[in-house]
Image (spheres, rainbow, N blue to C red):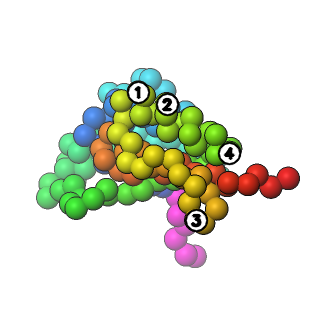
């Protein structure tokens, strides 16, 4: 049997701040998780997203260091339509998160925007420019 892709893990410096960001994107995470060293959330389709604090990772990998030279990962969130890309981007930036690229109409046929999560990872927001009937 071949390995099955099951989980995307993020290493975070502030669990509560990171979870607050992802809650704004619709991920169901209980408020009681904010002080935990490891958190997992089920995503549509069976994939899981997990967060570990730096201290948790260093407990089993003392030499762990954050990536250098850019974001360590990019996650993409599908939006219902171009207006939702704009709305979610404005909501996140209005809440104090850093906008990396304002919404634009990409040449590949999508409305696209990029926001940084609290740890500097790129979070892409996208929707088709033309909604198919």
Prevailing SS of the magenta stretch: loop
Tags 1 and 2 in contact by the CB under 8 Å rule? Answer: yes
| Element assignment for label 2 | helix
Report whether 98 appears left or right of 4. left
Q: Nearer the viewer, mark 3 or mark 1?
A: 3
Residue 77, x across and y down, in percent: 55, 48
| Number of other residues with Cα within 10 Å of mark 3, as a class: few under 14, some 14 to 19, many 20 or more | few
Magenta residues (range):
1-6
The residue shown at (80%, 55%) is 132
Rounded to the nearest whole Å, what is the CA distance between mark 4 and mark 1? 21 Å
| Element assignment for label 1 | loop
Q: Which mark is residue 91?
A: 2
| Number of other residues with Cα within 10 Å of mark 1, as a class: few under 14, some 14 to 19, many 20 or more | few
Of marks 3 and 1, which one's residue comes earlier in the chain? 1
Q: Residue furthest bottom?
A: 1
Residue 74, x across and y down, in percent: 42, 56
Rounded to the nearest whole Å, what is the CA distance between mark 2 and mark 4? 16 Å
| Number of other residues with Cα within 10 Å of mark 2, as a class: few under 14, some 14 to 19, many 20 or more | some
Which of the pair 25/1 is nearer the observer?
25
Of marks 4 and 1, which one's residue comes earlier in the chain? 4
Tags 2 and 3 in contact by the CB under 8 Å rule? Answer: no
Q: Nearer the viewer, mark 2 or mark 3?
A: 3
Rounded to the nearest whole Å, what is the CA distance between mark 2 and mark 3? 25 Å
User: Per the image, is 2 magenta?
Assistant: yes
| Element assignment for label 3 | loop
Which of the pair 130/120 is nearer the observer?
130
Residue matched to label 3: 107
Residue matched to label 4: 81
Q: Residue furthest top?
A: 32
The residue shown at (14%, 54%) is 62
Residue 115 location, quadrant: top left
């Amino acid at each position: 049997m071949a390995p099955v892709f099951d989980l995307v893990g993020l290493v975070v410096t502030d669990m509560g701040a990171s979870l607050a960001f992802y809650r704004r994107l619709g991920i169901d995470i209980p408020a009681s998780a904010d002080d935990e060293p490891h958190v997992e959330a089920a995503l549509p389709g069976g994939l899981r997203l997990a967060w570990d604090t730096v201290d948790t990772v260093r407990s089993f990998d003392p030499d762990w260091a954050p990536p250098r030279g850019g974001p360590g990962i990019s996650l993409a969130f599908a939006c219902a339509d171009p207006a939702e890309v704009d709305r979610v981007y404005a909501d996140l930036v209005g809440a104090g998160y850093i906008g990396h690229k304002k919404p634009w109409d990409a040449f590949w046929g999508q409305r696209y925007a990029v926001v940084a999560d609290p740890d500097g990872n790129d979070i892409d927001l996208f929707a088709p420019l033309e909604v198919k009937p």
